[in-house]
Amino acid sequence: MKKNFVGYVVLAIALFLIALLRPYAFFYGVQRGSLYSLVALPLALILGIVGLLNLAHGEFLTLSLYMAYLLFTKWGMDPLVSPVVTVPLLLAFGFVVYKLVIERSLKTHHLNLLLLTFGVSIVMVESLNIWWTSRPRNIYVPYASTSVNIFGVYVGGYEFLYTIAVVLVLTGLLLFLKKTRLGQATYAVGQNPKGAAIVGINVKFVYAFVFSLAAGLVALAGALLSVRSSIFPHVGGPFTMKSFSLTAMAGLGNLPGIVLAGIVLGIAEEFVKSIPGYTGWADLVFFVVLIAAIVFRAFGRREG
Amino acid sequence: MLLKTEKLTKSFGGLIAVKSVDLKVNKGEILGIIGPNGAGKTTLTNLISGVFYPTEGRIHFEDKDITFVPAHLRARMGIARTFQIVRPLRDFTAFENVVVSCLFARGESLREARKSARKICELVELDQPERRLDRLTVFELKKLEVARALGCQPKLLILDEVMAGLNFEEMQRMIQLVKSLREKQITICVIEHVMSVISQLTDRVVVLDRGEIIAEGPYERVAHDPKVITAYLGEEA
Amino acid sequence: MKYFMIAIVCVLCFLLPFFVGAYMIHVLTSIMIFLSLALSWDMMLRTGQLSFGIAGFFGLGAYASIIAVDDFSIDPLWSILVAAGFAALIALALGWIVLRLREIYFAITTLALSSVFMIFARNLSDLTGGSAGKVLYESIFKGDSIKIYWLVLSVALTVILVSELFQRTRIRFAINAIRDDEIAAKCSGVNIFKYLLFVFVLTSAIQGAVGALYAQQYAFVEPESTFSANFLLLPMSMALVGGIYSTLGPIIGAVVLGLASEYLKLIMPYGHLIIYGLILVLTIMFLPRGIYGTVVNRIAAKR
């Protein structure tokens, strides 16, 4: 226990120093990190409850981005309003993918599932590529460029929406899992699927529900992201890997930990970006985090 | 003393499966390990064979500390075990299953391993071992488990509920087999629920309940120990 | 008798360029490149570990080989060995850490590899030419397509040989045991970590060598195309369609999909990756043992 405490203190000091010396990196890092956490939470849900690593996760994000773009350009729907349409659509899409492709292979070797979701991600990316081409699209709304003044530093204010969203989603998820019947059933399935089935929980329904819910949550993130990011077929890919790195670091089931890890990752990336000459290396940070997580797990516990 | 554990403890999160166990196994003996379901017998076996490491405590084998020695090295040192629910390797025939342990635990060449596997199959009376696994009876699968363990050329052999699922005659044959193994200088631990087997085979018995040793001694004495009876049957109302 | 037939087939393969046109030689060379990749992926799969690192080590080897020739004046043929060695070293370092955890951790780490190596390729521009890539003065063998064909054929035959060795020696027992049941395997004396590391390093070296072959053939590397997902997807689809856990399976898959993709390129100038993605999904869902595996199962069931 002592080791954990010392680690957190060191982390807090490091973050405080960064906030002081490189405030832009700190605030943009918090924003970016919140986005990572927001996308990682649904992945962790599927991983923890269904036991499945959805390699197509980032592509659901990409899909929701294109949807928001379509709604904006064709019907003038404001992206912040678009979740009303995109979330149900993506819920349905997640459900269809689950039923069509995944459910029948759940009993087979787990490697099959990995390959399956990988195949799905490729089909999604390439379909989007064929339909939309690789030309990046953008949505321009005036409020996306507002700035706020924090302790004398002017930063873009819009992206703090990610932080607000992730706190809301995290709270919502925790409350859901603890206080609602469906949530408790879901949690039970994650702990012990066979046991849950014995007490009468419809495990298949829970799986379908979690998968669809995750897709819907991703759509939320996509709606927020759509006004700040270029939209192109491969935009979601990195999110899959970064989400998994966060889950690996925080530990399955540790939802608050994932949010914290995400923010740390965001700050670390921005910090690296702010070092002159090392800007291009920022995208490696997640890999370092992943390897570090693996090292901690492998060498930290003396298990057989 | 062939095997000694000191305050061996294993916990899984909140559940303490094995609690401060001091087990001693003497060379050449047949030791029985009994106890109600969930007493920690298989966990103890997993700890001794190296499937996982203990939370606390130490294990000594032939005066060497093997607490954190990996499982495959323990197999090479001569610790072998069977699995309570048989887990033969599905991609292989029965014969090839035995070859695996001869190859890697004994370190023999493929040719030598095949010869050794043939001898072992004869010893356990496993006929036509080239069959695929789905053609084997329960008794033959159990014999295969023993054969695989014998492939490790064990000094210590732990039989985890090897009698489960056998009828009376098959049990007698298995008992004969275990007795013949003792003649080959193999020290044996027998984990069982069937008490007649324990009384026929073992020199000494250790009783586990809820992860702790509650009684030790010859079967006759232990069977009448009130603590043991309570453990199996529950408290008198 | 069987070996005699195999020897005849090999000799015929070597003589083939004299009987077919330049286009066919090119197609066959390409098929053999992907065949080697497919086999190397399958060899790792046989241990029960799913690696997405094919494209990563392929690209790593390609870059290593081009840099070796361009900056260190190493002979192109030797550069292939350099590439294999370099890929093996990286695989050793990575595998030593990640193979302790395996499964999804291993799979995701290998998936990240091509992105990670791409970042290195883009940023170390002095060495790698950055986003523009590097071009060699001339291809290996001055571009003689028959000699290139023979070189690629030799490598492919070597890989086939290695795969068969894995199926026939004690390695088969270790690998199948590890894949089937790790606990039973280690209680039978199998050093799981050692074997996994060995197979990972070996297959990564093969992928590096093949990457070097490819790079020397076309005499250039460039981050986007060298690390293309094509080099990950196509080998995987070939092994899956042909039949995993075998030598013959990936070979069948390579020929079938290799010829099919040539045809596909004619009618569908871009976007074939979606076809391979679909093949991947459909094969897993409906034909998980592939062509070869299904045939073998049918024969075994009839006995």
Image (cartoon, rainbow, N blue to C red):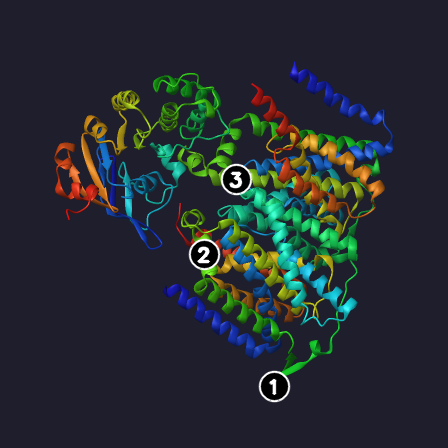
What amino acid is at disc 3? Answer: Leu
Residue ID for mark 1: A152
Whether residue B67 sits left or right of residue C28 in the image: it is left
Q: Quadrant of residue B78?
A: top left
- Of mark 1 and mark 2, the one earlier in the sequence is 1
Whether residue B101 sits left or right of residue C202 in the image: it is left
What amino acid is at disc 1? Answer: Gly
The image shows a total of numbered marks equal to 3
Question: How far is disc 2 from disc 3 in space, using C-alphas?
Answer: 38 Å
Specify the subunit that label 1 lies on.
A
Residue ID for mark 3: C196
Question: Where residue C34 sits in the image (x, y, percent)?
Answer: 71, 37
SS at circle 3: helix
Q: Nearer the viewer, residue C92 or A201?
A: A201
Specify the subunit that label 3 lies on.
C
Residue ID for mark 2: A185
- Of circles 2 and 3, the one toward us is 2
| Label 3 environment density (alpha carbons within 10 Å; few <14, some 14–19, many ≥20) | many
Q: Nearer the viewer, residue C287 or C228?
A: C287
